[in-house]
Structure formats: structure tokens, C-alpha cells
Image (cartoon, grey):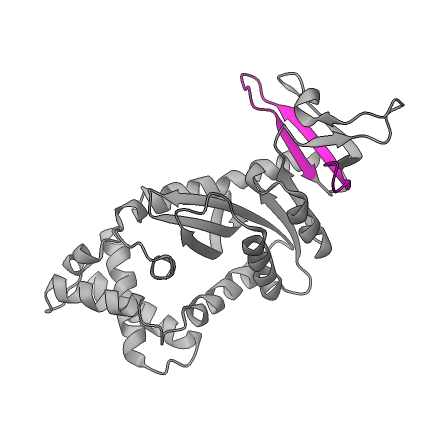
Amino acid sequence: MGSEYQLYQMWNTQLSDLFNWNRPEHRKVLTWLMVAIFIGKDICLDRLGLYLPREAKPESIGQQFRRWLKNDAIDARMIYDPVARQIVRRMRCRRLRIQIDRVQIKRRQNVLMMSVRYRKRAVPLAWLCLPYGYGQIHFLHWQALLDYLETLLEAEQSVVILADREFGSVDRLRYVKRKNWQYAIRLKGNVWFYDPIWKQPFEWLPLQAIAPVRGTRYALTAIKITKSDLFKTHLACAMAVGSDEPWFIATNLPQPIQALKEYARRFGCEELFSDLKKRGFNWEDSMIRDPQRFSR
């Protein structure tokens, strides 16, 4: 028996255990789709049939996969949700480091990804595929991901949200805080702040005005950011040797300086995106333009 059939049998059994499939043929098509992507390291539907030991022509297999991707009768959430729950349940650490980031696939797709850190890598938990024209991720998208994350957690698990400066807005920080989670989220240098501990005269400054010297780091506690929100947060600042980009990390960790170490752990998602785009899954070869189909 070839490795393709062994993979098919193993994954078909695992998928059948996820939930009660109304149409077993839907599960079988998905299983063959997974096998083809894994064996071929390719997601071009027209080529996937070339990697399968099936009598049907590759063109026919590609059409079968297309019908599955656009079939509204298939509830993709019911397939992925049990997998995400297993990932979270099997994490040995009680503190989950959740990374949220966005990747663009050429001029076709905009993917907002939520992943959990595991052994210096990022394991996907949930994602939203949006049209390419979305220049910024709206707060409602952020809210949807965090609300879903909350449903996955075990009672004893805590969360640290790690995100880049694209997500460094007060409404997002406030929403994480509302869930009693911790965060280490980078802010842009043009964010205005003031430190109530400083002596008078009272003065607002942009964060870039207090950029640390290269090779140094420091933390401020209980500062206020943005003149309109007066949001209270801690701040960890650092500038690497040889870098022109200071880090300004908003955090509610008890030891604010630790936010620098936590934020650095975010870069596992960069490796994940490289794998998805180039090294293995070759997202950029996909010609699918419909966000919902690409999400599947």
C-alpha cells in the first residue's frame, strides 16, 4: 500500500471522529484534498490530481475539489473547531502565548491569522480571509478572533496576546484587558502619551521622543496614551544595536520589562507565514480569489 493510501486512511479516520458527517463523501473529498496538498506541497487545484493514485483525470479531480470549496452545505467551522480545541487542550503550558498577525497573498487575499506559540513556532488556531482591498484590519475582526479564542480555553489557562503595531490601538488593548488577559502589543512611534509620575509642567509627547539609545531598554509604568482615550498602560522600550526601529511595547504584565521578551516570541508567526507562502504550501500559487473558498 502506497504512502498516499496510508495517509488517506489515517486522516479519513481522524476526520470521521471529529463530528457526525451528514455526507460521508464530503469527508472523503476533503481527505484526498489534504493528502494531495501534503504530498505535492502545492495548492494549485489544477495540479493536485497529479499527486494522487486515482484513476480519474487530474482535471476531474480538480473540479471535484472546486465543488467542495464552494459548497455552502459544508460547515467548515464544524471541521476546524474540534482541531483547534484539541490543540489548546494539549498545550502543556498554562499560559498561552497567542500571536495575531496579517499576511497578504499577492493581490488576491488578506489573511488575519491567530496562532499559538509552541516550541518557537506558531500553530494556527483561527483565521479570517478578507478581500485584498482591506488595508486595515477592523476592530470587529479582532473582536471576532478573541471571542472565539475565549471559547477554546480550558479553565486554568491564561493568555498573553502578542501583536505588531498594526494592532496597537486603544480599542484593541481595552478589549484584551476586558477579558482579563495580558498583552504585549507594539505601538507606533507617533502615539501620544504622558507620564503622570513626571513633575510638572504637564506635557504630552509622541513615543518617538523617548526612543531609547541603541542597545538599551527601560520601562515606564502607568502611563496614559492618546489624548482622546487616556488609556492607562505600562510601556517597555528597547532599541537593538544596529537598528533604527525602536520598540514601544504596551503591556499590562506585572513586570513591564518582561514584555520585550514576550513580544520577541511573536516572530514564530513570521516563520509560519513563510511556510504557508513559499516553503511548503505555496499559497502564492493559488488562483482562488473568493475569500471564503480560500479560507477553507
Q: Is 245 in the magenta?
A: yes
Residue 217 sits in quarter: top right
The reply, left or right, for residue 47 in relation to residue 172 is left
Is 59 located above or below residue 270 in the figure? below
- Residue reaching furthest to the right: 200
What residue lies at 66% left-to-right and 59% top-to-bottom?
Answer: 157
Q: Is residue 256 visible?
A: no
Is residue 223 or residue 87 the one in the foreground? 223
What residue lies at 26% left-to-right and 53% top-to-bottom?
Answer: 43
The reply, left or right, for residue 103 in relation to residue 177 is left
What residue lies at 56% left-to-right and 23% top-to-bottom?
Answer: 245
Is 252 located above or below residue 66 in the figure? above
Q: Is 57 in the magenta?
A: no
Is 237 located above or below residue 33 in the figure? above
Is residue 151 or residue 176 the one in the foreground? 176
Segment tinted magenta in the rendering: 226-250
Residue 238 sits in quarter: top right
- Residue reaching furthest to the front: 228
Q: Is residue 224 visible?
A: yes
**Quadrant assignment for the C terminus:** bottom left
Residue 48 sits in quarter: bottom left
Is residue 290 or residue 12 the one in the foreground? 290
**Residue 220 location in percent, x, y?**
77, 30
What residue lies at 41% left-to-right and 46% top-to-bottom?
Answer: 133
The reply, left or right, for residue 1 in relation to residue 145 is left
Is 133 located above or below residue 238 in the figure? below
**Residue 86 location in percent, x, y?**
51, 65
The reply, left or right, for residue 24 in relation to residue 134 is left
